[in-house]
């Protein structure tokens, strides 16, 4: 299991279209993936869970991966939210 903290740099945060793209990318991996903000942890493969966190630009989140391809998945998702 790995955890990585990252600052969200996407202009609109993880709202609407970027959230849908994030979930689509997360679903490419077999690892269990979670996203945590302010102590609330949700399944990173769930659009409803992700939207419930209301993540905006500049906020710090933690990506958690557990499974065979956890490192690759977390690295990919970190780069997804960290790109401006």
Image (spheres, rainbow, N blue to C red):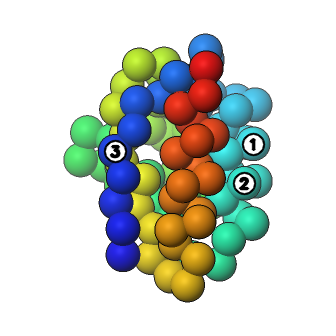
According to the picture, the residue beneath numbered tag 3 turns out to be 5
Q: Quadrant of residue 12?
A: top right
State the mark number for residue 25. 2
For residue 40, side relative to residue 43 (left or right):
left
Q: Residue at x 58, y 41 (%)?
A: 79
Q: Give how far across and how far down residue 8 sits, in percent.
A: 47, 28
Q: Are marks 1 and 2 in contact (CB under 8 Å)?
A: yes
Query: Mark 2 or 3 closer to N-term?
Result: 3
Of the pair 45 and 8, the residue shown nearer to us:
8
According to the picture, the residue beneath numbered tag 1 turns out to be 21
Q: Is residue 60 above or below residue 10?
A: below
Q: Quadrant of the N terminus?
A: bottom left
Q: Residue at x 41, y 19 (%)?
A: 58
Q: Quadrant of the C terminus?
A: top right
Crowdedness of circle 3 by 10 Å Cα count: few (<14), some, many (20+)? some
C-alpha separation, residue under disc 2 versus residue under disc 3: 18 Å
Q: Is residue 32 visible?
A: no
Q: Give how far across and how far down residue 23 sits, in percent.
A: 68, 51
């Amino acid at each position: 299991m790995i955890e990585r903290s990252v600052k969200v740099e996407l202009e609109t945060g993880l709202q609407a279209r970027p959230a849908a793209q994030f979930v689509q990318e997360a679903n490419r991996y077999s690892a269990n993936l979670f996203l945590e903000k302010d102590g609330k942890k949700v399944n990173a493969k769930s659009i409803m869970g992700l939207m419930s966190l209301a993540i905006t630009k500049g906020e710090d989140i933690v990506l958690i991966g557990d499974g065979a391809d956890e490192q690759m998945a977390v690295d990919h998702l970190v780069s997804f939210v960290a790109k401006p």
